[in-house]
């Protein structure tokens, strides 16, 4: 769990994903459209990917990817990010995390 939390806190926006998941690319594109520059960890190519995926499941991510950390906190998966965006709250999350400046 320490590795996932350490990586999750390493940048204002961190996305855990797998290289074959198109929804993860969509989430990354959405976040970049606000001007943020997320760090992306592809678990299927990372040496500790299987362990990190297990940890994400233990943290409540179902499915395990994409899992998005904003401001050092796990904010959820694709549904959560899309919900924040639809409600107009994603931009504010990114601002509070110092991922973007207005």
Image (tube, rainbow, N blue to C red):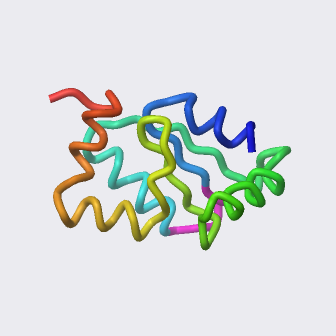
Q: Is residue 64 left or right of residue 54?
A: left
Locate residue 96, reporting x and y percent.
Answer: 28, 33
- The quadrant where residue 5 appears: top right
Q: Is residue 18 left or right of residue 97?
A: right
Span colored in magenta = 17-22
- The quadrant where residue 7 appears: top right
Please tell me which residue is depicted at 25% across the width and 60% down the height of the picture: 85
Query: Quick check: 91 above or below 99?
Result: below
Q: Work out which quarter of the rendered image holds the N terminus and state it.
A: top right
- Total residue callouts: 0
Residue 86 part of the magenta-drawn span: no
Residue 19 part of the magenta-drawn span: yes
Query: Quick check: 65 above or below 71?
Result: below
Query: Quick check: 76 above or below 36?
Result: below
Please tell me which residue is depicted at 48% across the width and 68% down the height of the picture: 23
* Residue in front for this viewpoint, 93 or 59: 59
* Residue in front for this viewpoint, 16 or 33: 16
Q: Main secondary structure of the magenta part?
A: loop
* Residue in front for this viewpoint, 2 or 83: 2
């Amino acid at each position: 769990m320490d590795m996932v939390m350490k990586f999750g806190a390493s940048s204002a926006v961190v996305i855990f994903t797998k290289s074959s998941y198109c929804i993860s690319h969509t989430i990354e594109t959405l976040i970049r459209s606000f001007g943020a520059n997320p760090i992306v960890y592809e678990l299927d190519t990372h040496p500790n990917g299987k362990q990190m995926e297990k940890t994400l499941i233990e943290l409540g991510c179902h499915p395990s990817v994409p899992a998005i950390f904003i401001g050092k906190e796990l904010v959820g998966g694709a549904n959560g990010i899309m919900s924040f965006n639809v409600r107009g709250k994603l931009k504010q999350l990114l601002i509070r995390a110092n991922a973007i400046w207005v």
